[in-house]
Amino acid sequence: MAGARKNAPPREEVLAAAMRMIAERGLEQLTMAALGREVGMSSGHLLYYFRSKDELLLRTLEWSEGRLGAERGRLLTRTVSARRRLDAYVDLYVPDGHRDPHWTLWLEVWNRSQNADDEARDRQAAIEGVWHRDLVALIAEGISRGEFRPVDPDRFATRLRALLDGFSIHVAIGLRGTDRAQVLGHVREFVEEGLLADA
């Protein structure tokens, strides 16, 4: 076992392979055995590293969120208006379309969290919390610069993220009559009515 672990691919390579499999084949095809074949490890070795499929999925989500977080950080520190950065935040948040791999993974982790332990729930909350804090800070900055009308940044961010989550689920599952362009239009209207009126 020790020799096999020594020759195992780096954990990040395993997580990247899991995300790639979700994107290319769908979540239902991501089994420990299939992932093991993809990275040259036995399913037993994968279980040694990740303990369960639930843990593998949560670690893959955390890895994917780390990459998205870096991209979000670049977008939010650009020297453009708060409104343009808010548009970029929304664009990054909303799924690309039906079966978007990141959102497919999110939905599965959310679904499994009904039976998750406190540690797993805390880790999910940490992911959510970073998105929320970034949005609150951006709205507060826009208010301080006079770009947005004075609102409670935390309250507005909570409502905006609820809107984004609801619409994003519709896009990710391919609900008829809801596509990405429509969602972006609805969100743009919500932002204009809530933040830009009388700014």
Image: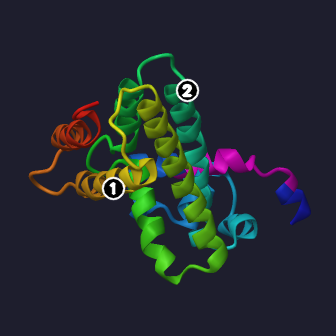
Q: Earlier in the sequence, mark 2 or mark 1?
A: 2
User: Which residue carries the number 2 mark?
Assistant: 74
Q: Position of residue 103 (x, y in %)?
A: 39, 53
Identify the residue shown where x is 28% and y is 59%: 166
Segment tinted magenta in the rendering: 6-18
Q: In what quadrant of the picture does the C terminus appear?
A: top left
Identify the residue shown where x is 47% and y is 75%: 112
Query: Which secondary structure type mostly characterizes the magenta part of the structure?
Result: helix
**8 or 107: which is nearer to us?**
107
Q: How is the image coloured?
A: rainbow
User: Which residue carries the number 1 mark?
Assistant: 159
**127 or 59: which is nearer to us?**
127
For residue 13, above or below residue 111: above
Q: Position of residue 95 (x, y in %)?
A: 33, 45
* Quarter occupied by residue 159: bottom left
Dot 2: what SS? helix
Q: Is residue 155 left or right of residue 48?
A: left
Residue 31: within the magenta?
no
Q: Position of residue 109 (x, y in %)?
A: 48, 66
**145 or 121: which is nearer to us?**
145
Q: Amino acid at mark 1?
A: Arg
